[in-house]
Amino acid sequence: MSISTADATALEAFLSRAKARTDRALEEALDALLADARPSLREAVAYAVMGSGKRFRPAMVLGAYETAGGADEAIADVAAAVEIVHAYSLVHDDLPCMDNDDLRRGQPTLHRKMGARLATVAGFAMVPFAAAAVERGAARLGLSSLAARDVQLILFRAAGGGGMIGGQVLDLLAGGRDARLEDVRELEERKTGALIAASVEIGAVAAGASPAHRAAYRAYGEAVGLAFQIADDVLDLTATSTELGKTPGKDAKLGKPTYPLLMGIDGAHREAEHLAERSVAHLAAAGVSSPLLAALARFVVARRS
């Protein structure tokens, strides 16, 4: 699955703009919502949140919002809340009691930089920080109380036991065990896919999408989310630490089941491509045409980091 030169240029510009908007919103949220926090905690949260990540999940919020007809710049505040949840998950995922990793986004993990105790506390503190940020963003967007509640529920259900945290539990239990493809699919849909799907649905809800269109955006996000994690599994075996910004080959060393392990690298790559195509088909079936979201789906599979 390839991206045309014109689409690649437009996508690069969009991703750059999305990252800049999200970073500004994150800085504003840090200043507004953590002003009274202890300096050490604020420094730790800022280190985790303001690293050189791709801001892919915020980009999905912005892309879905714009595609669904939204035009308020304040959507970046909601997108920033999604990024805070994602960053918190990375902090805890890297801890010594979890994956015990040394490198994240091309720099030392938070617990290597500031100690495991502060990293653990900072991760927990980022959950209410994200809740305050999404409430602030919904208010600045002028969302109704019902729409604001919807956005909050979508985000924190995706982050909870039925989504990201539940996926992390499955991941911790997976090492050294035989697994079926459906088991790996459930793990990856929860651990990674749930927050990406939520990002897309949040953008659609914030723009006032109809129930039918909202369902199509959600289906698109679920397919892209799984494709993203499968592509990550492939990159974990084929990319360098410089490309990834993190330690490659960790899952294989821990004996964790992945799509490449069960299907081979080529088979897993084809499955990711199939999911990216299916994601766009979900939108088309609902009458939604978006070159931007189609390019984002293709980017998920074609990226090298």
Image (spheres, rainbow, N blue to C red):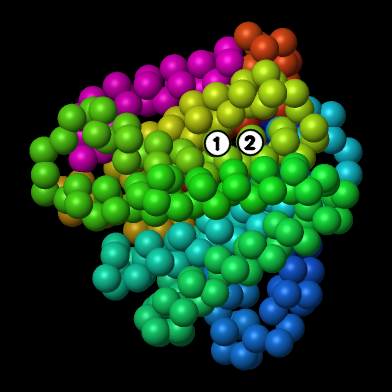
In the displayed structure, 14 sits above or below 176; it is above
Q: Which residue is mark 2?
A: 200
Residue at 51% across / 16% down in the picture?
278
The circle on residue 173 is none
Q: Residues within 10 Å of mark 1 (few under 14, many from 20)?
A: many
- Location of residue 49 by image quarter: bottom right
Q: Position of residue 61 (x, y in %)?
A: 68, 41
Q: Residues within 10 Å of mark 2 (few under 14, many from 20)?
A: many
Name the residue nearer the viewer: 283 or 304.
283
**Residue type highlighted by circle 2:** Val
In the displayed structure, 26 sits above or below 41; it is above
Residue at 55% across / 58% down in the picture?
85
Verify CB contact (< 8 Å) between mark 2 and mark 1: yes
Residue at 39% across / 51% down in the picture?
161
Q: Position of residue 253 (x, y in %)?
A: 18, 53
What is the spatial separation of the Cα atoms under label 2 and label 1, in whole angstroms? 5 Å
In the displayed structure, 226 sits above or below 138; it is above
Q: Position of residue 6 (x, y in %)?
A: 74, 23
In the displayed structure, 281 sits above or below 249; it is above
Magenta span includes 30: no
- Looking at the rendered structure, the secondary structure element under dot 2 is helix
The circle on residue 197 is 1
Residue at 45% across / 52% down in the picture?
160
Looking at the magenta stretch, what is its main secondary structure? helix
**Residue type highlighted by circle 1:** Ala
Per the rendered image, the range of residues in magenta is 257-282
Q: Is residue 264 visible?
A: no
- Looking at the rendered structure, the secondary structure element under dot 1 is helix
Q: On the picture, is 133 further left or further right than 261?
A: right
Q: On the picture, is 246 further left or further right than 298?
A: left
